Amino acid sequence: MAERNLAGRIAIVTGATRRMGIGAAICRELAGRGADIAFTHWNDYDRNMPWGGDEDGPGLLKTELESCGVRVLSIQADLSNPDSPKQILDQVEQELGPPSILVNNAAYSINDGYEQLTAELLDAHYAVNMRAAILLSVEFARRFTLGEGGRIINMTSGQSLGAMPKELAYIATKGAIEAFTRSLAPDVAPLGITVNAVNPGPTDTGWMSEELKCELLPRFPMGRVGLPEDAARLVAFLASDDARWITGQVIHSEGGFLR
């Protein structure tokens, strides 16, 4: 059992719709360490993706997290709505109290290339991957009055380590989040908030076909593909007091993935 080193803390985790996803794994890890959890979900996105929605996922995840003995708030939120960040923080403060941990995990990703890329597709990626994460982060910082222990953790990708063809809108928005992470960190450090980003690398959250796994496996020198729990453990560390001297970093947790 994990040490309950986050007891008494309140964490917001976006994008925890699917029980197999990284967001749900982060919720489990933080709850197992004693943090109260507010997570957002939006099945309309997953429903239209190849892996499909997890209609019962949010309710079942809430019950699972509550079994850890923590308070849990499940919020249905369309993060493409620019009003959502403020509404999420309002609800968390009203029902749980002031949060000290924010994990921007929600993502919008549709494969594209130069032939498919449109303004509409760019805007859809921008609204969730950039605007929502940035607005949540700055609103979190504006309201943070605890003086220490604040954590903003952004989930990014490996776009700075090598080419990711046919994911142009996705890599552009995730690259912006890396830059935002580095520049926000010194801005909010005097408030007692650290800001870091995690790149989990290729992670099996149920979207990988067996063919793709076989293709990727030789590029993992540790002999397996990434799991949601790998990213969740790193996020939990960054949320803890042990990581209080780490800020402005993009941490690549890919099991040595060869690009």
Image (cartoon, rainbow, N blue to C red):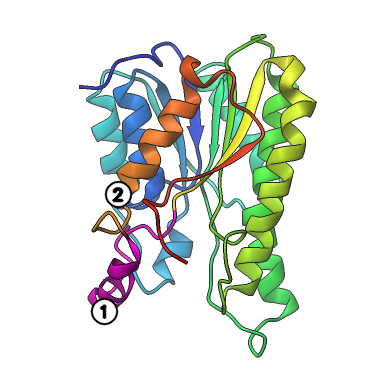
Q: Viewer-proximal residue, 24 or 217?
A: 217
- Tag 2: residue type? Arg
232 to the left or right of 217: right
Mark 1 neighbour class, 10 Å CA radius: few under 14, some 14 to 19, many 20 or more: few
Q: Residue at x 57, y 60 (%)?
A: 161
Task: Please identify the quarter of the rendering in which residue 93 is found.
Answer: top right
Identify the magenta region. 201-220
Q: Residue at x 67, y 86 (%)?
A: 114
Mark 2 neighbour class, 10 Å CA radius: few under 14, some 14 to 19, many 20 or more: some
Task: Please identify the quarter of the rendering in which residue 148 is found.
Answer: top right
Residue 205 forms part of the magenta stretch: yes
Residue 5: x and y in percent read: 37, 14
| Residue bearing the label numbered 2 | 19
Q: Residue at x 67, y 28 (%)?
A: 140
Residue 39: x and y in percent read: 45, 37
Residue 222 forms part of the magenta stretch: no
Nearest to N terminus: mark 1 or mark 2:
2
Q: Is residue 50 above or below residue 159?
A: below
Is residue 117 something one can see in this rendering? Answer: yes
81 to the left or right of 151: right
Q: CA distance from mark 1 to mark 2?
A: 23 Å
Q: Callout 1: helix, strand or loop?
A: helix
| Residue bearing the label numbered 1 | 211
Task: Please identify the quarter of the rendering in which residue 121 is found.
Answer: bottom right
52 to the left or right of 142: left
